[in-house]
Image (cartoon, rainbow, N blue to C red):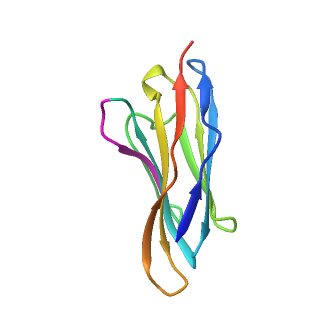
Amino acid sequence: QVHLVAPWGGLVQPWGSLRLSCAASGNIFRVNAMGWYRQAPGNQRELFAHMSRLGSTYYACSVQGRFTISMDNAKDTMYLRMNSLKPEDTAVYYCNADTTSRTGFLMQSWGQGTQVTVSS
């Protein structure tokens, strides 16, 4: 079993910045990739940032140039730096990890979700 812990959401003013983190622990041999999803009220959960262990990244158009994803492979931890936040970024943010267990199984795990609210 893999546990993802992602605290540090919160309330931020428009054009402000926020940094999220997501730490993976448990039955992990290797973290293969991690990603951030978000779900706004009435909307589906959507992937907006993703990073592989080798460093390749993906950003949705809505966050390109404003958000930066990074990983510390030694700590199995992913970070998300969010700049120039807009009210439409308000959502519950979830982290996701694709991992290989110590016995060679591929696993996908989710964090508990953290609320990010952008409002004046």
Which residue is rendered at x = 57% and y = 58% of the image? 4
Considering depth in this image, is 18 or 106 the residue closer to the camera? 106
- How far across and down, in percent of the image, does residue 35 sit? 47, 54
Q: Residue at x 47, y 37 (%)?
A: 92
Residue 40: x and y in percent read: 38, 32
Q: Residue at x 42, y 40 (%)?
A: 38
The number of callouts visible is 0
Is 110 above or below relative to 106?
above
Q: Is residue 4 above or below residue 40?
A: below
Residue 49 painted magenta: yes
On screen, residue 75 above or below 50? below
Identify the image quadrant of the C terminus.
Answer: top right
Q: Residue furthest bottom?
A: 103
Coordinates of residue 89 in the picture (x, y in percent): 46, 28
Q: Residue at x 60, y 49 (%)?
A: 6
Q: Quadrant of residue 114?
A: top right
The part of the image, by quadrant, that contains residue 62 is top left
Magenta residues span 42-51
